[in-house]
Amino acid sequence: MNRSPFVYLLLFALPWRATAQFIDPGFEQSGASPWLMTHPLWTAIVPSDAPYGGSTLMGIRAQSQNFPATAYFYQALPVAAAGDQIQVRFSCRPDPGEGAPPVVANAMLFLLSINAGVPTIVGDFQVTAPMAWTMQDITITVPALPGGSTFGLGFGGVCFQGGDCYMRYDNAHISISGTGAKLNAKAWLDGCYVPGLGLMRDDLRAAGFIPTTEANGILTTWQQFPTGETTTPAVLAVTGNNAIVDWVRVELRMGSPEYGIPQAMRNALIQRDGDIVDVDGVSPVTFPVKGGNYYVHVAHRNHLGVLGTDAVTLTSTPVTFDARSPSTNLYTHVGAESGPPRKTVGATRTLWAGNTWRSLLLSKDILYVGSNNDRDLILTTIGGSTPTQTTTGYHRADVNLDGVVKYVGENNDRDLILLTIGGSVPTAVRYEQVPGP
């Protein structure tokens, strides 16, 4: 069989080690990737042409009548235990090579028992791989393994009808059922961020306006995910840098940033220093999954959310997603609705303030004028006729989160919306840079 015309960058086998879930699911780390392979000569990375993002992909020579070896690349999943349900999402397509006729090929997902660094196939799944890129979903149950073995997953392929090909894989993500995956998320809410202090104000907490239960409607949510998380008055009584500022939502998505499928969601609390914590006010946010790799989406009831584009590997050992850091890569739309996903404030980044109309799948933007503009809701909240009136309480129209909805005068909420859209052209629009809901 002729080699593929692509220039393959060979990856040589690394010593086996107990890793967490699919490190480098997009195959972007080149030679530093923890993906192991049974046949390094026939396993390689190449530039990606997949429509789901990323710069490289993994190629593997498929088994055929001309190549009887079962070649695959793989990783150990030490968190997985017998009986666990694992959802695997990946994109794939065959690569027959330039000038070759179309081939009939299947993608292969191998269930592995890894003992002393040696993988053994204990089961497999096959899915048809069309010539065009397709996203595949497979749910497996982890089998019982011999003592001392670790479960792993491998990717290979098989060609039929006398054909030969490589299989291409990209965006290989997993989600393991269970509980206990932890995340240290961080963000700044621009409406109450004070640059000189490097902290957010906690006026809502000090005034007693933050509800102890995150009720439906405070944030857009998915029906299949739990809501109504509850904290305690004692948590809301804490002062200082760890004082609670408000509720936020943290969502885990799997698949790819553009076409990510929400897998888990938690409503959590954000502190003055930007830490997002669980309802006890101190712990990392814990999700109803055992492990996996995910894209992190952080949202707030009247700020624009952000979505990371680097998969974060979650287990019971907390990892960090810092939306404040300029080095954290975030999704950005292409085209007319493109724009910076966060506001630049000195050396840090904040979430854009002013999305007073967030509701269901609508209003993922901030407008100062026009239909359903965010400025009008401020006027409506204070009564709708006298712009000098104010209203206190827990309201979406309270853009600066000081507990007072104010249309004119010092510290009014209207001016923040104008600043968010650019500060000079009232018809400008600030779009949320998050695909989907």
Image (cartoon, rainbow, N blue to C red):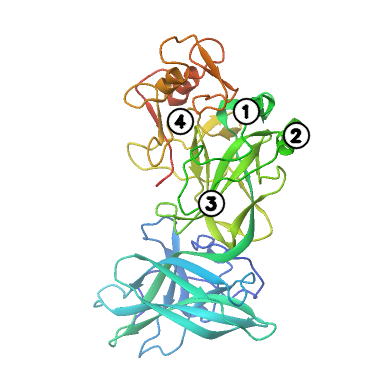
- SS state under label 4: loop
**Residue 184 drawn above or below residue 389:** below
**Residue 102 drawn above or below residue 416:** below
**Mark 3 touching mark 4, by CB under 8 A?**
no
Query: Viewer-proximal residue, 127 or 242?
Result: 242
User: Tag 3: residue type?
Assistant: Pro
Give the Cα separation between the discs numbered 4 and 2.
28 Å
**Residue 148 drawn above or below residue 322:** below
Residue hosting label 3: 226
Q: Which residue occupies 51% across, 19% down?
A: 413
Residue hosting label 4: 355
Quarter of the C terminus within the rendering: top left
Observer-side mark, 4 or 2, equals: 2
Badge 3: how crowded within 10 Å, few (<14), some, or many (20+)? Answer: some
Residue hosting label 2: 238
Quarter of the N terminus within the rendering: bottom left
- SS state under label 2: loop
**Mark 4 touching mark 2, by CB under 8 A?**
no
- SS state under label 3: loop
Query: Viewer-proximal residue, 162 or 286?
Result: 286
Among numbered discs 1 and 4, the one appearing first in the sequence: 1
Observer-side mark, 2 or 3, equals: 3
Residue 256 percent location from the top left of the image: 44, 56
Badge 1: how crowded within 10 Å, few (<14), some, or many (20+)? Answer: some
Among numbered discs 2 and 3, the one appearing first in the sequence: 3
Residue hosting label 1: 209
Give the Cα separation between the discs numbered 1 and 3.
23 Å
